[in-house]
Amino acid sequence: MLKKLLLLPALLFCGATAWAQTAADPNKPLNIIVFGAHPDDCDLGAGGIASIYSSMGHKVKFVSLTNGDKGHQDIGGGELANRRYKEAQEAARRWGIQYDILDNHDGELFPTLENRLAVIRKIREWNADVVIAPRTNDYHPDHRNTGVVVQDAAYLVIVPNILSSVPPLTKNPVFLYFRDRFQRPNPFRPDIAIDITETLAKKVDGLDAHVSQFYEWLPWTNGDLANVPKDVVERKKWLLTSMERRSSVTPEIKASLEKWYGTEKAEKVKYVEVFEITEYGKQPNAEEVRRLFPMLPKN
């Protein structure tokens, strides 16, 4: 115990030094961690920026809080969980990122202390600069509870006596929400809009790895399975069309694009990924947002 107490100040100093170096050196790689409920959720919300960050030399980790063992019309259990794990790893390979999957059952995720500590551990071990997760108003309970778990972890990642086996962060990351369509109790606010027009095909390349989801399960739930092309090339084109609709620019998003890109460049943006800055964690100013999203143009 005494050895641990003596080591703690040194660990805290090292963490503080690392943060100071990151803040002072804009060329130091950023650490981005994204949480989803299922193995494909992170991909839908942040696959575009993950690809961009990776291509720029930054580090990205996706984390699914469940193993996805219920999300299919024909198979389930360990067989499906194993298939979805392999699909997630293939998507990660295509984007040059890391992908972790926790062993919680699909459809049974709760904001327990165990899950909160697991999320705190992931954020600390990744030394995250940015944390992204779903909002807590959503159609799926796993999505809602993922949002709750990450919110509950947001402040605690800097508290030394919480999960004391893992050194706390010496700075609070910026916490963001994915884009969604839900209006109650409050609609999504597009604080940060990122142009993925030139990256959408690369995003779809990663989504294409999730065969069980984008070509089987999700079309089945939407009554659209018969329209999925059988040919692997044609179905990827079909998926691209779907993602074009999902990534479109609304008037509210257009205003955000103009803020970050200027009016002239905003006019040329066709497809976006958009994020809301949460009230939890660090509250970044415009300069800090541009540092954390280095794909944005510099003023």
Image (cartoon, rainbow, N blue to C red):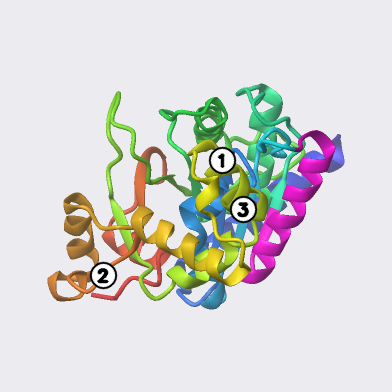
> Residue at label 2?
269
Q: Picture coordinates of residue 79 (x, y %)?
A: 83, 42
Q: Main secondary structure of the magenta part?
A: helix
Q: What amino acid is at disc 2? A: Val
Front of the two marks 2 and 3:
2
Q: Is residue 76 magenta?
A: yes
Disc 2 to disc 1, C-alpha distance:
32 Å
Which of the numbered marks, if any, corresponds to residue 220? 1
Q: Quadrant of residue 159?
A: top right
Q: Picture coordinates of residue 42 (x, y %)?
A: 55, 50
What residue is drawn where x is 77% and y is 36%?
103
Q: What amino acid is at disc 3? A: Phe
Indicate left or right for 174 with 19 as reference. left
Front of the two marks 2 and 1:
1
Q: Dots 2 and 1: beta carbons under 8 Å?
A: no
Q: Dots 3 and 1: beta carbons under 8 Å?
A: no
The vertical placement of 201 against 219, above or below, is below
Q: What amino acid is at disc 1? A: Trp
Tell me if I can see residue 176 in this picture: yes
What residue is drawn where x is 59% and y is 47%?
169
What residue is drawn where x is 70% and y is 33%?
70
The vertical placement of 268 against 229, above or below, is below
Q: Is residue 166 magenta?
A: no
> Residue at label 3?
62
Q: Nearer the viewer, residue 11 or 60?
A: 60
